[in-house]
Amino acid sequence: MLNRDREIVTPLLQPGELLAEAANVSLAPGIPHPPQELLTPRRPSALEQKIAGPFNSLRKAYAVLNPVSSAVGAVEDRLMNAVPDSVVHGQGMGGSWQSAAGRFVVRMHDQGASASGLFAVTDRRALMVVDRAKLWQLSESNAVHWEASRAELVEVRRNAKGVLQRGRLDLVFADGSWAGIVTGLPANADPLAAAFAHRPY
């Protein structure tokens, strides 16, 4: 575990809680994007609204001045969207959107989480920490974005079958559902799995 990761998570722990391991992760490829109606509507700030106007004008002007490039880009987008990630990367999630895994995935797309964060394992729970600072803010604003007790999350499974990602881990929940995550560095996957497998009681 990096000292920086420890410094981020430690202030967010409960009294007496012990941090075992932490690493940056993202949702595994192959997980579909949650339906829009399950996500919390995001209201842009006043500054974002002010900035959006000129950018939208530039985008429209570019499309008018360069219609061929715009058309090619639109076709590429359609082709990429036509092939699900699961075909290329293997299945990334098991369970419905109402399952524990589904709710985890929804949460990881909600309120600016961007499907990634710092995954930490303690003696009591697993948690995902995200930086909620806006792009223009100079300092980080780390917060616990998701958490599950060791009774709710029953296994952090290594060596998922049929996938290409070497840093792949599957989070297995008590209801039988699961969701894949991928560590930024493959070497961080084994320590996370080992830390969760070690039961402190």
Image (cartoon, rainbow, N blue to C red):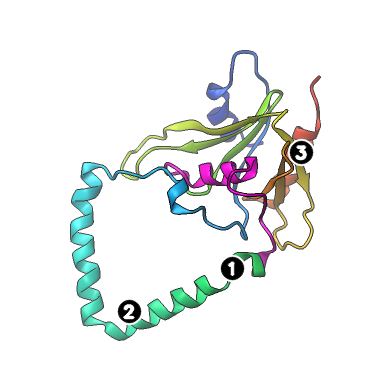
Verify CB contact (< 8 Å) between mark 2 and mark 3: no
Name the spot of residue 8 as percent of width and height, x first.
53, 30
Indicate left or right for 166 with 59 as reference: right
Q: Residues within 10 Å of mark 2 (few under 14, many from 20)?
A: some
Instruction: Residue at the far bottom: name it.
Output: 68
Foreground pick, 100 / 50: 100
Foreground pick, 80 / 12: 80
**Residue 89 drawn in magenta:** yes
In the picture of the structure, the residue carrying the numbered disc 2 is 70
Instruction: Residue at the far top: name it.
Output: 15
Amino acid type shown at disc 3: Glu
Amino acid type shown at disc 1: Pro
Which of the two discs, 3 and 1, labels the residue nearer the N terminus?
A: 1
Identify the magenta region. Answer: 88-113
Q: Is residue 106 above or below residue 76?
A: above
Q: CA distance from mark 3 to mark 1?
A: 27 Å
Mark 3 lies on a secondary structure that is strand
* Count of numbered tags: 3
Mark 1 lies on a secondary structure that is loop
In the picture of the structure, the residue carrying the numbered disc 3 is 155
Q: Is residue 172 above or below residue 149?
A: below
Foreground pick, 158 / 82: 82
In the picture of the structure, the residue carrying the numbered disc 1 is 84
Image quarter of residue 21: top right
Image quarter of residue 138: top left
**Residue 193 drawn in magenta:** no
Mark 2 lies on a secondary structure that is helix
Q: Which image quarter is the N terminus in? A: top right
